[in-house]
Image (tube, helix red, strand yellow):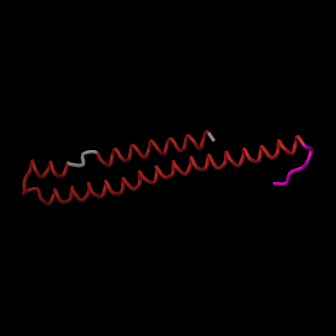
Amino acid sequence: YGQLAGMAHNHDQQSGQVAQWAGAESDFADRLLATHGKVAYATYLNVKGYTDSRQAEAGAYAQRNADTAVALRGSIESTRSTDEGSAAAFRSSSSTGKVVNT
């Protein structure tokens, strides 16, 4: 369980880091246009396109990491529940002397 929990934690961290990176300097294109004017409009459009794409793609990647963390935690709970149920069945069969087929 510990390894899965660690992996989930890593995915949470990665999700946050990617989301933070995607949002960094999101106003750069607008600042470029404000400081350089219409002469840099073609550059502005390219920077704006890159920034928008970066935010969209990184946002999707961050969401996949967050979803993976949730799925890993769900796997932990499911596996733990199954293990506990199996252990309970084994303990109950041990106390009665009956063999339980699972």
Residue nearer the viewer, 8 or 83? 83
Can you give x and y, in whole percent of width and height, for residue 48 in the image? 21, 56
77 versus 40 height, above or below:
above
Residue in view at x 86 percent, y 51 percent? 100
Residue in view at x 36 percent, y 47 percent? 19
Residue nearer the viewer, 32 or 75? 75
Can you give x and y, in whole percent of width and height, for residue 84 in the image? 72, 44
Quarter containing the C terminus: bottom right
The image quarter containing residue 24 is: top left
- Queried whether the magenta region covers residue 14, the answer comes back as no
Can you give x and y, in whole percent of width and height, for residue 9 in the image? 51, 41
Residue nearer the viewer, 98 or 63? 98
Residue in view at x 92 percent, y 44 percent? 97
Looking at this rendering, what residue extends furthest in the right direction?
97
Range covered by the magenta-colored residues: 96-102
Does residue 54 appear to the left or right of 13 in the view shown? left
Does residue 1 appear to the left or right of 40 in the view shown? right
Does residue 59 appear to the left or right of 73 in the view shown? left
Q: Main secondary structure of the magenta part?
A: loop
Residue in view at x 60 percent, y 41 percent? 3
Quarter containing the N terminus: top right
Q: Give the tally of numbered discs.
A: 0
Can you give x and y, in whole percent of width and height, for residue 75 in the image? 61, 50
